Image (cartoon, rainbow, N blue to C red):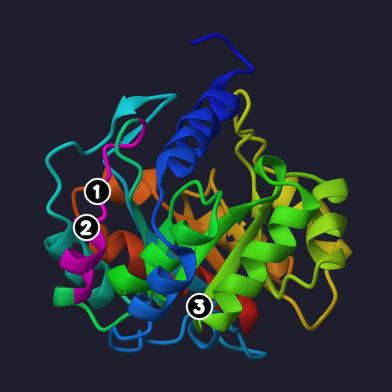
């Protein structure tokens, strides 16, 4: 796959799948509401003053840029380890073709942990949101660069109607302003360019000043060390979303605890 085609190719797969899905949206949404209410995600991510940065720990088997990370991971075991290490929430990649995920992974994590789960996938249609609710997820991922403004607004409304949080992901100041314009209340700055999959480790800190105080903020990707966590905590982020550094760690619980403690040290320094 050539540089610059990663995101386009992945989104094309998901849009084709959505176009072929002839289920009735209203019926799927009503059915999803019959599932037990999931634990709230937003409340788990809010970071009051002088409290440690929250960690969203990710269940992720592979990456298009680095291929296999942890192909044999057990999502339930990993979720339990994350919870014991002090994670605030768990992100579960359910995309199969590109990340080796499975929707069943959400249930496996929920069975072993009481933490809220973010269904991390390439959400392009209301049925994707309804499916996340039916899986037991507490939130969905909406990527600004993959959606039109109309789609973003619509999917935010669907998520809200189903009682789900929406983590709206941005990569630059323009995307951040688009997210805020449509009323996003939880915004993640992904330091990984989804066109090239290269990481800019300073992007989250550079964009921190653009946020208003009423937005829950998440720094994503390129966070692997205590120093990375301290930088994001010092910049004011509520939470960190961390995947690769945790799934490849020999002790994921300790790795989560290290990142969370780094935020705690910085927040009271």
Q: Quadrant of the C terminus?
A: bottom right
Asked whether disc 1 touches disc 2, contact meaning CB atoms under 8 Å apart, the reply is yes
Callout 1: SS? loop
Q: Height in image: 181 above or below 95? A: below
> What x and y, as percent, mark residue 247?
28, 48
Residue at (28, 88) in percent of width and height: 36
Q: Residues within 10 Å of mark 2 (few under 14, many from 20)?
A: many
* Side of 160 where 41 appears, left or right: left
Q: Nearer the viewer, mark 2 or mark 3?
A: 3
Q: Residue beneath label 3, please?
A: 164
Residue at (53, 29) in percent of width and height: 12
Q: As rendered, which of 5 and 65 lies closer to the eye?
A: 5
- Residue 100 among magenta residues: yes
CA–CA distance in space, label 1 to label 3: 20 Å
Q: Residue beneath label 2, please?
A: 105
Asked whether disc 2 touches disc 3, contact meaning CB atoms under 8 Å apart, the reply is no
Q: Residue beneath label 1, please?
A: 102
Sequence-first tag of 2 and 3:
2
Sequence-first tag of 1 and 3:
1
* Side of 257 where 177 appears, left or right: right
- The answer to whether one can see residue 233 in this image is no
- The answer to whether one can see residue 122 in this image is yes
Q: Height in image: 115 above or below 219? A: below
- Span colored in magenta: 98-110
> What x and y, as percent, mark residue 5?
59, 18
* Side of 128 where 95 appears, left or right: left
> What x and y, as percent, mark residue 229?
55, 60
Callout 3: SS? loop
């Amino acid at each position: 796959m050539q540089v610059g085609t990663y995101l386009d190719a992945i989104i094309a797969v998901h849009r084709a799948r959505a176009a072929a899905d002839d289920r009735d949206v209203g019926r799927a949404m009503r059915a999803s509401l019959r599932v037990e209410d999931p634990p709230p995600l937003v409340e788990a991510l809010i970071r009051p003053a002088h409290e440690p940065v929250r960690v969203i720990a990710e269940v992720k088997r592979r990456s298009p840029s680095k291929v296999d990370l942890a192909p044999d991971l057990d999502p339930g075991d990993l979720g339990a380890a994350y919870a014991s290490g002090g994670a605030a929430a768990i992100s579960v990649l359910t995309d199969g073709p590109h990340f080796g995920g499975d929707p069943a992974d959400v249930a496996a994590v929920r069975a072993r942990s009481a933490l809220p789960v973010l269904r991390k996938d390439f959400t392009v249609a209301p049925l994707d949101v309804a499916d996340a609710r039916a899986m037991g997820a507490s939130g969905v991922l909406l990527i600004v660069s993959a959606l039109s403004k109309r789609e973003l607004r619509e999917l935010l409304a669907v998520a809200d109607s189903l009682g789900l949080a929406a983590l709206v992901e941005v990569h630059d100041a323009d995307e951040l302003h688009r997210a805020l314009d449509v009323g996003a209340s939880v915004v993640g700055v992904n330091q990984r360019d989804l066109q090239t999959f290269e990481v800019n480790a300073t992007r989250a800190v550079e964009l921190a000043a653009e946020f208003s105080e009423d937005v829950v903020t998440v720094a994503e990707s390129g966070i692997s060390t205590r120093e990375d966590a301290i930088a994001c905590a010092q910049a004011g982020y509520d939470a960190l979303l961390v995947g690769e550094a945790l799934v490849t760690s020999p002790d994921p619980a300790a790795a989560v605890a290290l990142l969370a403690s780094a935020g705690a040290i910085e927040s009271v320094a």
